[in-house]
Structure formats: C-alpha cells, structure tokens
Image (cartoon, helix red, strand yellow):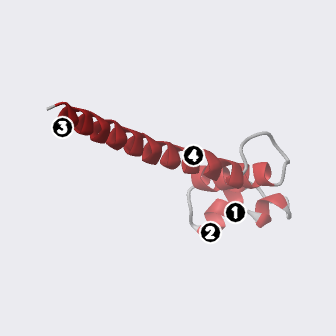
C-alpha cells in the first residue's frame, strides 16, 4: 500500500509487480486511506467495534433467554 500511497505508483502496476489482484490491492489501499483519514469511511478500528457489539448482543440475548426459561420453570414448580 505504501508503494501506491507514498510513492504514487498506480494500483495496477503495484498489483502486477506483487502478483496480486488489482481488486484486492484496491480494497487495501481504500482501507488504508480511510485509516489515514484521507477519505471517508470506517477505519479499521471502527470496523472492529460493531463486530464486538454484535457478539456482546448475541451473548446478552442468550443470557436473557436462559433467565426467562429459568424463571418460567421456577414459577411452574413453585405453583404445584
């Protein structure tokens, strides 16, 4: 990415020199520009936060559902 961003080479020439696909390198360069605040978009750190929150949300839903089931079982057993 530094070859494109710092040295001004084209994505096509760098991709060919490195033997990788232009779309892959283009994505990496686009992300690096976002990380450097040279373009709009989520930074790499900004992408990690929503993923962490989704995992936490799933865990909390599981805990909530478990507590609902435990409460229902407790109510059923105490009413008998």
Q: Residue at x 70, y 60 (%)?
A: 13
Q: Residue at x 25, y 39 (%)?
A: 74
Q: Residue under label 2, please give it.
A: 18
| Tag 2 near tag 4, CB within 8 Å | no
Q: How many marks?
A: 4
Q: Looking at the figure, which quarter contains the C terminus? A: top left
Q: Is residue 58 above or below residue 19?
A: above
Label 1 residue SS? helix
Mark 2–mark 4 distance (CA, rounded to whole Å)? 36 Å
Label 3 residue SS? helix
* Circle 3 Cα neighbour tier, 10 Å, few/some/many (<14 / 14–19 / ≥20): few
The location of residue 21, given as percent across then percent down, is 56, 56
Looking at the image, is mark 3 or mark 4 earlier in the sequence?
A: 4
Q: Residue at x 62, y 52 (%)?
A: 48
Q: Tag on residue 14?
A: 1
Mark 3–mark 4 distance (CA, rounded to whole Å)? 36 Å
Q: Residue under label 3, please give it.
A: 77
Label 4 residue SS? helix
The location of residue 43, given as percent across then percent down, is 73, 50
Q: Residue at x 86, y 63 (%)?
A: 6
Task: Name the front one of labels 2 and 4.
Answer: 4
* Circle 2 Cα neighbour tier, 10 Å, few/some/many (<14 / 14–19 / ≥20): few
Depth check: give the residue in front, 5 or 46: 46
| Tag 3 near tag 1, CB within 8 Å | no
Task: Name the front one of labels 3 and 4.
Answer: 3
Q: Tag on residue 53?
A: 4
| Tag 1 near tag 2, CB within 8 Å | yes
Looking at the image, is mark 3 or mark 1 earlier in the sequence?
A: 1
For residue 37, side relative to residue 13 (left or right): right
């Amino acid at each position: 990415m530094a070859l494109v961003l710092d040295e001004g080479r084209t994505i096509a020439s760098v991709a060919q020199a490195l033997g990788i696909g232009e779309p892959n390198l283009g994505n990496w360069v686009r992300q690096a520009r976002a990380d450097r605040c040279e373009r709009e978009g989520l930074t790499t750190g900004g992408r990690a936060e929503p993923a962490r929150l989704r995992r936490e949300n799933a865990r909390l839903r599981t805990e909530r559902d478990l507590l609902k089931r435990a409460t229902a079982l407790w109510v059923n057993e105490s009413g008998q």
